[in-house]
Image (spheres, rainbow, N blue to C red):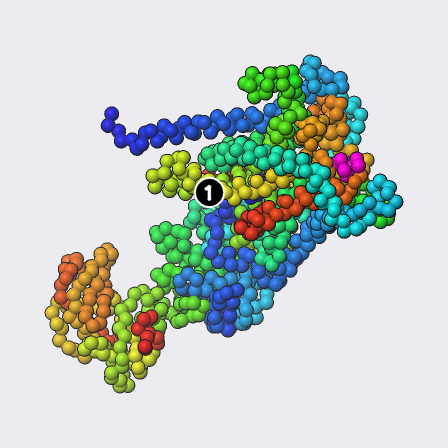
Amino acid sequence: MAIAGFSASPKKGGTRGNSKGASKSALKGDRKGAAIATILLIPGLLYLALFFLTPLVQLVVTALESPDASGAIGAYVYDFNLQNFADVVSKYSLQIFRSFGYALVATIAALLISYPLAYFVGVKVRRWPLLQRLTLVLVIAPFFISFLLRTVAWKQLLAQGSPLLGVLQTIGFVPHDGYFIGTPAAVIFGLTYNFIPFMTLPLYTTLERLDGRLLEAGSDLYANPFKVFTKITLPLSMPGVVSGTLLTFIPIAGDYVNASKEFLGAPDTSMIGNMVDQDFLSNQNYPYASALSVLLMATILILVALYVRRAGTEELL
Amino acid sequence: MASSVAAPTSGAGLELRNIRKEFPGFTAIDNLDLEIKAGEFFALLGPSGCGKTTTLRIVAGLETPSSGQVFLGGVDITDTKPHERAVNTVFQSYALFPHMSVLDNVAFGLRQRKVADPLKKAQDALALVELSHLADRRPQQLSGGQQQRVALARAIVNRPSLLLLDEPLGALDLKLRRQMQIELKAIQLEVGLTFLHVTHDQEEAMDMADTVAVMNKGRIEQMGAPEALYDRPKTTFVSKFLGQSNLFVGDVVETNDSAVSISLHGNKITVPVKRAEKTTGKIAVGVRPEKMQFHESAPAAAAGQNILGPGEIIDIRFTGVSNQYLIEIPGVGNVTVFAQNVGKSPVVELGAKVWVSFKVEHAFGLADLPVGSEEA
Amino acid sequence: MTSVSTTPRHRRKFQLGDSLLWLYTLVALVFLLTPIVYTVVYSFNDSVRSNTVWEGFTVRHWTNVCDQPGLCDAVGNSFLIGGIATVASTIIGTMMAIALVRYRFRARSFVSLLLFLPMATPEIVMGAGLAALFFLIQSNGLEGFAFGYTTIILAHIMFCISFVVVTVKARVQTLDPVLEEAARDLYASPFRVFRKVTLPLLMPGIISAALLSFALSFDDFIITYFNNGSTKTFPLFVYVSAARGVPAEANVVSSAVFFIAITVVIVMQVVGALRRKKYSA
């Protein structure tokens, strides 16, 4: 599921490929190996424990806080107040529903757009490695422009009075005299666009590793190209589809830049992210902000847990 | 770090004592004892998975034995790290460093040991394998045979006490393999190193080695000069792995101080006591197919001859140099006979009725029984 | 014509599907690159404040990019933060990648999971959580600890590690361990093996990982937004100015970074391809 498919194609190195005897001790399972592995892993593990796990714990703790006796804004004490979760769900039910809805649509759209692209780069142009790599560079090129500026660009390109909007109006996609920016469609559009690379790269990595001889075998056994795709390519690329989905669905649900009014959204397209921003930085209602974040985090954990139960952890990275 | 490895001028002897190597779930080597004399060309022969590569890696230091000791030139090197051992390996996949030129590959070990004038010595080694003109190429640009020779040069240039070869000729085509076998042997004699050659190709082992050890399931079944091993295998495995054998299983019906005989459906098969591992109970007696002859009419009984038959020729295979005849003898089984093509080929036709005979002195008695014919 | 052709209709359909795919890819790439083109083009827009309407071509934004108050400081901050975060996360991540591929250890599943989660967690969750943590540290009196460079760098390193691991891991998996064994067999101590064989062969992957890490750090908005104190980074500058109109100088900076990054990546690919061609005659 490597996001970094563009760096190296996973073919065997050395001068002649894998030697039989080496594989037994290549995985150093003895005590000395475990000791070295520990040394190599400790800095990273400690770091992540400190700056990834602890903040999550901190969020849970904060989500359980109640207003301080003094009633001052921003002052809270730990109280095991589960009510916060209930409050947040009822208060922001609209945003929650909207966020997951947008995320669902955007994820599916991203998948539909990315798959043929990933297929092209990972399978179709295998014969020309240089073209393959250059196309891949173009696919991830958006990464190198600030994501805020990308979104602003679409905002301008699709603003009222722009030629592009005119085209859309002519097609009928947007009602005449209608506008696009500020509508849910615009937000979903922005979300889809910005997360295409996150969907494409895992798909690409899986498709790139697809053994071409399997496709040839399919043809040899009388399957037409369509059948070869649906019966062989698609099932075998499922791991990539799942990875891509895991990496896009929840991050999209948690996004707030696209939906905010400065960019592609309007006050009535606000998502979970906007609410967390508001509660955390404007209202200083830390428990609510944390509770909402925890709910979002819980969702991704459940999804990942389901995946891991089905497919284990080996393919995750 | 100055190397603590001395550079000997000729090979040293190797001794493995009570080596045992366990991996999670299976035992790769089970009580191995081995001794290789200095300057010898030693072959470790066996099928895939028998533990020969693991043995090699233990000698190289890339694996540590679960128990047992390794002695090189009389010195215990069991706990010495691989980069401190005067042992070098020619790997099966050659393992040439792709990011260095051929010359730098060959000079690598010399540079690590801070030997003076590494490039000159590397060039000499390349000259020995006749690849001086490729010194500046990258390994990826070379053919399989050339890469193999570079791998050899890279190991030999360090004048190790012991050179380990892990099936180095496996990827080469037949003609090139034959050529390399001759060259390897020549180099070994010229430089005077001790070679430990691991292979599953029995012809290669018999051709090149002074001593062959046949390994099976983590143990050495038999060890000795190729001719001795071939002439007198002691176990079923060795008899079948090294060349082919016809095996006859029967109860001992007659013994005296010179011969042991078994009976098989009325056929008596005799083997000299000196060439029999077991002399009582149910034993297996074997003979090589090329030592057998067939007769189109019943041969007269003669001393020193085993006669079996009659039987019917059920298959003939042509292999250029010889024909292989498969003869079915009721009560005895299927017997293979190799006959050199010195004239008419085949000598007899399919379906012909024949008798087979072989000299008693060519028979050998095994220590074990073939699978499926053990005592019930 | 008596030539034997197998399923000609088959082949024709195949051709159509084929060319459709090429066409689709072209359209998709145009779609993907449109905002980039827009951004670059509008860096030349002769605008004064808000850069929304095309007013004419000029290069003054490129020549006087630092005239925009706060912009160059922000960009400088982003480079500094990006540099430090890249170095730290690349070292940590490379170590972890090697451990994951080459060594067998019991906590393997846990480590993989822990590395995966930051990539799948919404930035808002990580941003809010880190802010809560840092706030706690600050309010519990750690001398001199304040929201600013430190907190931003600490945050960036955190989310970059996973991406470095994924990138380098792919590269380590292509490295045949027998090469390192050969080096040990040829008298190289473990440290020498790493320096002379492992590291050179891993370098392309490590460089890719570093580039990716820098890109992620430079471009990060949400997490930085929650943890920046008063330090401005380039994305923060853009966000704040988005309300009244992003100035063209921001486009200049972004375009410049884009061209440098793309050039580096393309050069690396082309050099790699040339080298492969040269050495695989």
Left or right of residue A237: residue C155? right
In the rendered image, residue A35, in percent from the top left (x then y), is placed at 64, 60
Write the residue at 40% across / 71% down: B221
Subunit of label 1: A
- Badge 1, how many Cα within 10 Å: few under 14, some, many 20+? few
Q: Position of residue A227 (x, y in %)?
A: 40, 37
**Outermost bottom residue:** B256
The amino acid type found where label 1 is placed reads: Pro
Q: Residue at x 70, y 14 (%)?
A: C55
> Is B99 or C256 nearer to us in this picture?
C256
Query: In this figure, what is the number of numbered marks?
Result: 1
- As helix, strand or loop, the secondary structure at mark 1 comes to helix
Query: Farthest residue in the top direction?
Result: C56
Tell me which corner region of the image, top left, top right, bottom left or bottom right, holds residue A275. top right
Q: Is residue A91 left or right of residue B119?
A: right
Residue A84: x and y in percent read 74, 45
Q: Which residue, given by chain and number where applicable, does mark 1 sit on?
A: A235
- Please tell me which residue is depicted at 20% across the width and 76% down the height of the picture: B265
Q: Quadrant of residue C131?
A: top right
Q: Is residue A277 visible?
A: yes
Task: Say whether residue A256 is left or right of residue A3.
Answer: right
Please tell me whether residue A278 is drawn above or below residue C107 in the rendered image: above
Residue visible at 59% across and 65% down in the picture: B80
Q: Which residues are magenta?
A: A277-283
Prevailing secondary structure class for the magenta stretch in the rendered image: helix
Coordinates of residue B254 in the picture (x, y in percent): 24, 84
Residue A246 within the magenta-colored segment of the rendering: no
Q: In terms of depth relative to the viewer, which is nearer, C27 or B207?
A: C27
Can residue B9 be seen here?
no
